[in-house]
């Protein structure tokens, strides 16, 4: 554990709670497919490779589909044969969609994607100066809407890093409604994900913790977020808000409040994660890069996996890269979500 943490130095791509030993261990408590390969160079431990091993030797990142940072946590300039690694892990294929930069698993075939961040290394005031210069209209409008929310709904309060389970349940309820409303799969219909989030909320140390925060107006919950942190990096994970307050842009109000409190607690970077969202474009100060693809050994299992996964991934990437196709797909999903809500109601 100490060696693993020592490789997660602040300012490196490994300074991300999804790459922390505590995250892998907690997921392993609710999923028996989790494994960790410990990499040695002679007597020295030079890396850790957390992964999930599924039937037919299919390997995935820990908590695949939920995490925004994946890969090997390793010493600088580590050299290894990726196919030998996955063979020694009992895998035919290792697939990923948020592989961090500088990985020995990466090659030129893998697709790169931006992952927006908020840089708080110079403090919250410096960040707001950046917003005034680059997203001035958004920043001023958000402050005005916060004042309007306070006038019309009551005094605003922000609880940051609370351990209370009740607001977590409220947040997950909003998130479930959002998934259904927009035609997405409800992640919280899977009991292990709910249990994982609850366990992470209860996990607190200097180097790793679950972070729940909620904005209230006159004690009514308006917007919130559950994420994870190291000592210096906070990752965006599950943001949501009460749609009754939508006209006030509660998500933006919350993100500014969260950034201020996070900066005050020593957070230098908020990683908002891969994915094209309007609020990320308005709030970001820069971007990291993550990669999507797979490492595979020759064999029947790898061939079946390619047929089932790769064409679909390329189709999705083509849609995401085309604004017209993306808008059409998003509209179709929302229409499906409305129909599903009516039928289930």
Image: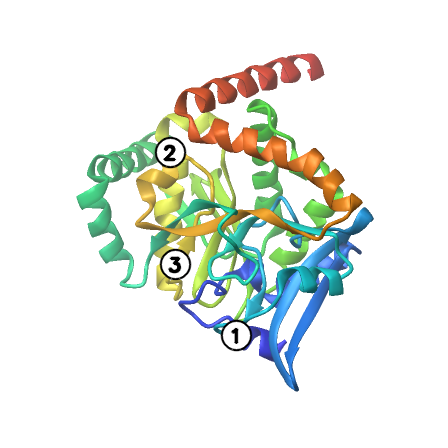
Q: Is residue 161 above or below residue 345?
A: below
Task: Say which residue appears at 38% left-offset and 40% top-offset.
Answer: 280
Residue labelled with disc 2? 278
Lower position in the chain sequence, tag 3 or tag 1:
1
How packed is label 2: few (under 14 Cα within 10 Å), some, or many (20 or more)?
few
> Is tag 3's residue or tag 2's residue first in the polypeptide sequence?
3
Kindly state the secondary structure of the residue where label 2 is placed: helix
Viewport quadrant of the N terminus: bottom right
Residue 149, percent from left and from top: 34, 33
Residue 285: image x %, image y %?
Answer: 30, 50
Q: Are marks 1 and 2 in contact (CB under 8 Å)?
A: no
Q: How many marks?
A: 3
Q: Which residue does the image show at 55% across and 70% down from the upper left?
A: 79
Callout 1 crowding tier (Cα within 10 Å): few <14, some 14–19, many ≥20: some
In front of the other: label 1 or label 2? 1
Judging by the rendered image, the residue that carries numbered circle 1 is: 75
In the rendered image, the vertical position of residue 177 relative to residue 297, given as above or below: above
């Amino acid at each position: 554990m100490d060696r693993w943490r020592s490789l997660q130095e602040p300012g490196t791509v490994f300074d991300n709670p999804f790459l922390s030993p505590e995250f892998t261990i907690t997921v392993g408590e609710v999923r028996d497919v989790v494994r960790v390969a410990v990499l040695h160079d002679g007597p020295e431990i030079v890396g850790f490779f957390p992964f999930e091993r599924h039937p037919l030797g299919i390997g995935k990142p820990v908590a695949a589909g939920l995490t925004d940072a994946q890969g090997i946590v390793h010493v600088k300039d580590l050299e290894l044969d990726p196919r030998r690694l996955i063979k020694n892990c009992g895998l035919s294929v290792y697939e990923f969609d948020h592989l961090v930069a500088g990985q020995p698993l990466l090659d030129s075939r893998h697709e790169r994607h931006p992952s927006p961040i908020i840089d708080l290394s110079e403090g919250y005031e410096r960040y707001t100066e950046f917003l005034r210069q680059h997203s001035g209209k958004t920043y001023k409008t958000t402050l005005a809407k916060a004042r309007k929310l306070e006038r019309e709904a009551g005094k605003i309060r922000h609880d940051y890093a609370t351990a209370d389970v009740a607001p977590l349940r409220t947040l997950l309820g909003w998130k479930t409604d959002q998934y259904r409303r927009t035609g997405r799969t409800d992640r919280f219909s899977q009991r292990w994900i709910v249990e994982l989030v609850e366990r992470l909320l209860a996990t607190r140390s200097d180097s790793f913790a679950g972070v729940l925060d909620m904005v209230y107006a006159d004690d009514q919950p308006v917007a919130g977020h559950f994420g994870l942190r190291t000592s210096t990096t906070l990752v965006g994970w599950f943001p949501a808000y009460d749609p009754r307050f939508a006209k006030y842009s509660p998500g933006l109000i919350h993100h500014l409040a969260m950034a201020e409190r996070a900066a005050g607690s020593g957070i230098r970077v908020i990683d908002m994660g891969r994915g094209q969202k309007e609020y990320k474009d308005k709030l970001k100060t820069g971007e990291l890069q993550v990669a999507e693809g797979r490492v595979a050994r020759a064999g029947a299992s790898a061939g079946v996996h390619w047929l089932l996964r790769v064409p679909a991934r390329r189709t999705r990437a083509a849609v995401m890269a085309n604004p017209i196709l993306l808008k059409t797909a998003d509209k179709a999903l929302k229409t499906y979500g409305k129909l599903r809500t009516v039928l289930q109601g």
